[in-house]
Amino acid sequence: MVRNKDSMAKVRVLHLAPDEKFIDMGLASFQRVGVANELIVFSDGKVKFVKHNCKVVLPLGSFDAELLKRRMTEFDIIIIHSMFTSRFCFPKSVKVVWVGFGFDYYPYICNSRNLLLNKTLNYVLEMKSFGRIPILKSDVQWLLLNLADRISFKFGVQKVISKVEYFCPVLVNEFSLIKIKNFPSKVVDWNYGTLEDDFIRGFEGLDIIGDNILLGNSASESNNHIEAIELIAEVKGFDVKVVAPLSYGNREYKEHICDFGKKKLSIDFIPLTDFMPIDDYIEVIQSCSVLIMNHLRQQALGNIIIGLFLGAKVFLQKRNPIFYYLTNLGFIIYSVDDVSTESLKSRLSYDEVSLNRRLLSSIWSRKVIDSKTKTLINTIIREVHS
């Protein structure tokens, strides 16, 4: 039974969050459904991204965990926005929800190595390191890396996760991919952002107006740019620009992709290495009738949503959970295996664009997201009183 707004107002929710841009998106829905929200932002510096009227800002590296635990007893529900610290202690009287960002639970889905295609992996093995542990050309080094990850998990984050009862992944189908014990057993379909307020706000009436290709979303190795650039160079066969957003991520990798893209595609490769205001970035996406996202993991969902709404043809790896999530819902989505000269030149029909837009609204509209927020609250409160 759905609680009305008056009864929702009696539900006290404490949000524990890092200073990330997604937080305001999520809090907006909790505010609209009428629960009593308080927010603590954890940051060792000045808060930059969270604009919400924060009740408290605590230092991430040195907050008093026991004092915070006592504060938690004033609330019915604790929501952790990403598993960003291993220092939380929870009282038994509260229900704990973990809203995943992706980076925080993907180590429990697969090894980082499995997110890279062969040529990108070879580059990483030769030139880089994951975290602070150098990666050498041997499986022994990878085993050591995995061991370090397991130890860190066992003695840090595992303790926090063991107290979490509810888990909200970015995509609900990712829950079945998690392969560790003692993970929260109750999955709830909820995550950040609405179509009207976050993804397409201010450009609802826009459409694709160019024939360029948007490649990837960041200077992260998980974009697998090397394989995508080689594929595009092989099949492109017509005058079109390849635009690669590289404004955030690893500097060394960014420089390598800039050089590699120019080598393979010459002046047709356009790297975007500086931060762009959202209006300018939307103009870039508008110029691209094709989006190629070569990730093997869930990533760049915001870009994909925007591209689909504008009418772009989106190509994803079949191994990417987003591919199965969207195709199972009926979206017109293509596999990277389908990339060819013809598939890059042809656009989606009016009916196909309209279908994708209707489906986007059925999943990410404000009405649907607020309904999911109410379901999350009701699910927890119902179990408390059962």
Image (cartoon, rainbow, N blue to C red):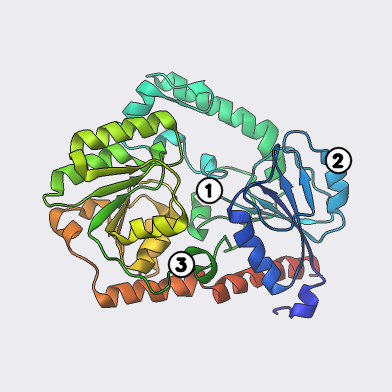
Between 182 and 127, the residue placed more toward the observer is 127
Within 10 Å of disc 2 (Cα), the crowding (few <14, some 14-19, many 20+) is: some
Instruction: Tell me whether the residue at label 1 lies in contact with that at label 3, contact meaning CB atoms closer than 8 angstroms.
Output: no
Within 10 Å of disc 1 (Cα), the crowding (few <14, some 14-19, many 20+) is: some
Residue 338 sits in quarter: bottom left
Label 2: element kind: helix
Residue 271 lies, in percent from the top left, at 32, 42
Which residue in the protein does label 3 denote?
200
Instruction: Locate the N terminus and report the quarter of the image it occupies.
Output: bottom right
Between 160 and 64, the residue placed more toward the observer is 64
| Amino acid type of the residue tagged 1 in the rendering | Gly
Upstream in sequence: badge 3 or badge 2: 2
Residue 323 lies, in percent from the top left, at 37, 57
Disc number placed over residue 66 in the picture, else none: 2
Between 345 and 278, the residue placed more toward the observer is 278
Residue at x-position 75% and y-position 69%: 35
- Is residue 175 visible to the viewer in this orientation of the structure? yes
Query: Label 3, label 2: how many angstroms apart (C-alpha)?
Result: 42 Å
| Amino acid type of the residue tagged 2 in the rendering | Glu
Q: Nearer the viewer, mark 3 or mark 2?
A: 3
Which residue in the protein does label 1 denote?
102
Residue at x-position 61% and y-position 74%: 371
Q: Is residue 378 left or right of residue 256?
A: right
Residue 43 sits in quarter: top right
125 vs 11: above or below: above
Residue at x-position 32% and y-position 62%: 286
Upstream in sequence: badge 1 or badge 3: 1
- Is residue 327 visible to the viewer in this orientation of the structure? no
| Amino acid type of the residue tagged 3 in the rendering | Ile
